[in-house]
Image (cartoon, helix red, strand yellow):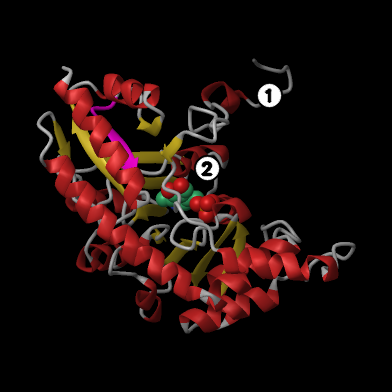
Amino acid sequence: MKSKFDRDLLDTLEPYSSEVSVSDTNIIRLHANELPWKNEAILWTLHENILEMPINRYPEVTNSYIRGRIADYLGFEKENVLVGNGSDEIIDTIGKAFISTLDKVLIPAPTFSLYSVITRIYSGLPIVLPLNLDYTLPLENILSESKNAKMIIICSPNNPTGVQYSEKEIKEILDTGILVILDEAYSEFSDQSGLHLLDHYDNLIVMKTFSKAFGLAGFRTGYCVSSETLVESMSKVILPYNMNTISMSVIDLAIKHEDFMKVSVRKIKENRKYLYGSMQEIKGINPIPSSANFILFEAEDPKMIYQELLKRGILIRYFEGKKYLRVTVGSYEECVKFITNLREIFDGC
Ligand SMILES: Cc1ncc(COP(=O)(O)O)c(C=O)c1O
């Protein structure tokens, strides 16, 4: 549908959807890279404190307390941190602050679809640079394209491939001087982070989120860390009171109960190992080694696999027109069910 008031751009955009609405609570959700567990300690504390919450008052306008809390946790100053209603809002804020009409934004892809959408919303030009066949970064291409570009958005480990890019490559890109957005939504599941590069580079923004390893997708809590200057630029365009009171206390509690994240990450890594090993043994699919909480796998007929799994109550991520699918690493029981059903599908072929 189209209204007479639409910008022309809207003809080329679709409302964001993860293609299936999951109302059936019995379905096994392995499509959105969520954590399978809830942090009960956070819920209990909220339950105890909820009646005292000053919900009639606006939260603090600059989110100063929670920015300081995240900064302390990571070893930065609060001036280096900006919080958002999910890291989605941070991506949007980066677009608002830094993308002018026809600015070129380099996007090695396949990757998270929002980067291109946001670039286009702010009238920039997404320059999609295809990853190498083994899903590594096309470094030569990036370096040559960077000469005319304003910004590059790199996701590491990358969604949907799970591939972690090397620090050497990221430094080479930073050395070009263009603005580098490093999306580390999944870095807790790998053993690497580019946060320490902020000591040496003032053209870097590292984005992070509590949605994945901390299991807080429902509270919409993301943030980025960067130089004081770039954070100040973004602060000029981010909406006032963008974070609600509950989400900010949830961030506080997530840091306080950081052990939940550490234990969850350890379990997900074990399950990932099981999942990857079992997938390798299934003839007809090719799983890609992953540093995240999901595994990409190539297959001849992804649509058939996706539909057959769905019939059996398992939802994974399907990408229209692509030769691969993505499965989230869930609890051990979920992984076993996925593997059992996948084997059955291939035995039946
Ligand atoms: C690479 C990447 N970045 C950012 C996000 C958004 O995360 P948030 O829940 O913090 O908005 C996602 C969500 O799936 C993602 O995959």
325 part of magenta stretch: yes
Kindly give the residue lying farthest to the right in the view shown. 56
319 part of magenta stretch: no
Give the residue type that dot 1 points to. Answer: Asp
Direction from residue 182 to residue 64 in the image, left or right: right
Whichever of labels 2 and 1 marks the residue nearer the N terminus, that label is 1
Q: Nearer the viewer, residue 231 or 305?
A: 305
Residue lying at 40% horizontally and 76% vertically, measured from the top left: 198
Say which residue label 2 marks: 118
Mark 2: which secondary structure?
helix
**Region rendered in magenta:** 322-328
Report x, y in % for residue 111. Answer: 35, 43
Q: Is residue 139 above or below residue 280?
A: below
Q: Nearer the viewer, residue 73 or 3?
A: 73
Q: Nearer the viewer, residue 267 or 189?
A: 267
Report x, y in % for residue 332. Answer: 32, 51
Mark 1: which secondary structure?
loop
Say which residue label 1 marks: 6
Residue lying at 45% horizontally and 44% vertically, measured from the top left: 115
Marks 2/1: CA–CA distance:
17 Å
